[in-house]
């Protein structure tokens, strides 16, 4: 049901960084984020949220299944080519691509890129200068997007976004970096390292000079600010921010913001020094 007429130019989330976005909301916190974001032009909401968005004077549609309807619209626009970015592929000089690697013709490769055996680079990926991509790494995969229809059937939604690796990024063997869902790319900044067998989720933003150790999982929309370090076998929950210069010790589970320069550890992770002192007191 259309509650208030309006227009939109793209599909996005409450964190939209370009104007004209339509987003869906099933929870008050995401609605409030969307209402505070001037880039959000229209809303697809559940009946419980109608009065809130109506009182804000925003264009909106009410649905009993806003998430399902949103991603059905996403799928339709993707199939029809409306989500396809304007794109000019390019190939830099002195690249070394193993004959057993698979590189989409719709990519932009910088200079001196090395792509090892079995690696796969998907559509609309941008790879900077002097990037190394190890054996069997996948750059630009579709990620987990569970959507169930009214009959209880699982639906599949290919991602329409991209991946951008900055200059001198190192991605080691077996790692998977998922394409973004919306327009802005999943990003790994200049001079960052991604370890073996690590999973980088959709819409993750990794800053410059970051380190992500082996066997880590960064769920969708995680942000690592410049100089952050996440060490081996760590899991970071969706949407979590790890601020500049912070360090997450190996084997941690991170579910909340890590402040700039802070070191955390454990499951659930909190200040590493405090955790160590707590452990020593208990072991006496």
Image (cartoon, grey):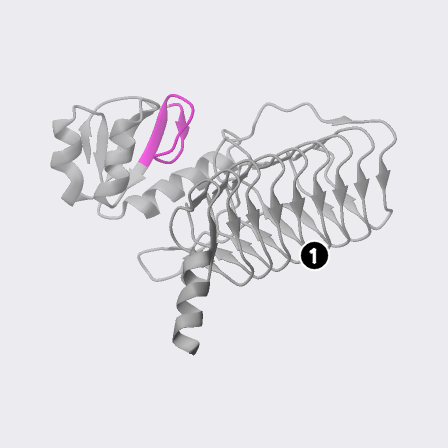
Q: Which residue is mark 1?
A: 174
Q: At numbered mark 1, what does the secondary structure look like: helix, strand or loop? A: loop
- Closer-to-camera residue (193/82): 193
Residue at point 50% right, 58% down?
235
Q: How many residues crowd around disc 1 within 10 Å: few (fewer than 14), some, or many (20 or more)?
A: many
Q: Which residue appears farthest toward the bottom when viewing the image?
A: 284
Q: Position of residue 112 (x, y in %)?
A: 83, 32
Question: Is residue 104 toward the left or the right of residue 280 in the image?
Answer: right
Specify whether residue 43 is painted magenta.
no
Please say whether residue 12 is visible from this viewpoint. yes
Q: Position of residue 110 (x, y in %)?
A: 76, 29
Residue interval drawn in magenta: 9-23
Q: Position of residue 60 (x, y in %)?
A: 22, 30
Image: 55 above or below 150: above
Residue at point 21% right, 42% down?
28
The mark total stands at 1
Residue at point 65% right, 37% down?
123
């Amino acid at each position: 049901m259309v509650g208030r007429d309006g227009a939109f130019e793209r599909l996005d989330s409450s964190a939209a960084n370009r104007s004209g976005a339509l987003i869906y909301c099933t929870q008050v916190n995401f609605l409030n984020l969307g209402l505070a974001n001037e880039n959000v032009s229209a809303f697809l909401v559940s009946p419980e949220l109608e009065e809130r968005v109506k009182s804000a004077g925003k264009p909106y549609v009410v649905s009993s299944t806003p998430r399902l309807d949103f991603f059905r619209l996403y799928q339709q626009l993707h199939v029809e080519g409306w989500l396809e970015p304007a794109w000019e592929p390019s190939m830099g000089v002195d690249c070394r691509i193993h004959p057993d690697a698979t590189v989409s013709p719709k990519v932009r490769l910088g200079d001196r890129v090395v792509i090892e055996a079995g690696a796969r680079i998907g559509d609309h990926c941008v790879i900077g200068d002097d990037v190394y991509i190890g054996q069997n790494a996948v750059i630009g995969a579709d990620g987990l997007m569970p959507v169930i229809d009214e009959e209880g059937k699982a639906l599949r939604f290919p991602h329409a976004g991209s991946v951008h690796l900055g200059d001198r990024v190192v991605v080691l063997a077996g790692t998977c970096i998922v394409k973004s869902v919306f327009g802005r790319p999943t990003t790994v900044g200049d001079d960052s390292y991604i370890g073996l067998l690590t999973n980088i989720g959709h819409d993750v933003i990794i800053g410059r000079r970051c380190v992500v150790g082996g066997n880590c999982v960064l769920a969708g929309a995680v942000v690592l600010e410049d100089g952050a370090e996440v060490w081996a076998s760590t899991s970071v929950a969706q949407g979590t921010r790890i601020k500049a210069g912070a360090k997450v010790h190996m084997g941690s589970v991170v579910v909340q913001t890590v402040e700039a320069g802070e070191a955390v550890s454990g499951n659930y992770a909190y200040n590493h020094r405090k955790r160590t002192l707590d452990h020593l007191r208990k072991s006496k």
